[in-house]
Image: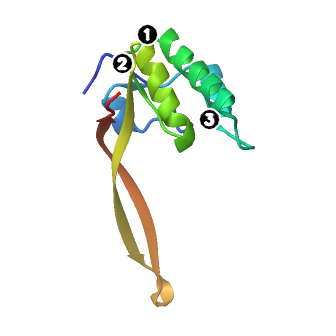
Amino acid sequence: MDMDGILNLTQHPATSDQIEDGVVEPSAEDKKVIQTILTFEEIPSAVEIHGRATDLALIAERYKVAYAMIGGAPFLMSDLERTLVQLGIGPLYAFSKRTCIETPQAGGSVSKQQVFKHIGFVRVMT
């Protein structure tokens, strides 16, 4: 589902399924910047939220992509969505199905593992 390029603007590396769907990773340097921008140690002001959204959107603009896969602090996402749209970049959220794998262990216990499988993207109305 290549959508003319989808930049990963999340803290996490794209999965192989997301890469198959057209997600590209930013450079290692930009990834560190993105991770820093998405990390909040204190309650941010509205001005700081807008500034961080703008910084992220400008990174995406440099990559000349049609879309950006976003995710992070909910209080940042709506401002980031609007800022991306103003630059002509469509915001997308990854959609995953969660499955639980139960594995019997020695002694009668059961180990549970949550597996997230990328299914596609959710486009938001902006």
- Asked if marks 3 and 1 touch (Cβ < 8 Å), the reply is no
Secondary structure category for the residue under label 1: loop
Q: Residue at x 55, y 16 (%)?
A: 59
Residues at discs 3 and 2 in contact (Cβ within 8 Å)? no
Secondary structure beneath dot 2 equals: loop
The earlier-in-sequence mark between 1 and 2 is 2
Pick out the residue farthest to the left.
Answer: 1
How many angstroms separate mark 3 from mark 1 (CA)? 21 Å
- The CA span between labels 1 and 2 is 8 Å
Q: Residue at x 44, y 12 (%)?
A: 87
* Classed neighbour count for the residue bearing mark 1: other residues with Cα under 10 Å, few (<14), some (14–19), many (≥20): some
Q: Nearer the viewer, residue 120 or 24?
A: 120
| Residue type indicated by callout 1 | Lys
Badge number at residue 38 = 3
Q: 67 or 84: nearer the eye?
A: 84
Q: Nearer the viewer, residue 124 or 63?
A: 124
Task: Please name the residue shown 64% across and 23% down the image.
Answer: 51
Q: Amino acid at mark 2?
A: Gly
Residue position marked by numbered label 1 in the rendering: 64
Indicate the quadrant where residue 101 lies.
Answer: bottom left
Instruction: Give the mark, 3 or 2, whose residue is nearer the N terminus.
Output: 2
| Residue shown at the point (40%, 57%) measured from the top left | 115
Q: Position of residue 8 (x, y in %)?
A: 47, 28
Image coordinates of residue 27 in percent, x first then y, are 57, 19
Q: Secondary structure at mark 3?
A: helix
Residue 5's label in the rendered image is 2
Q: Quadrant of the C terminus?
A: top left
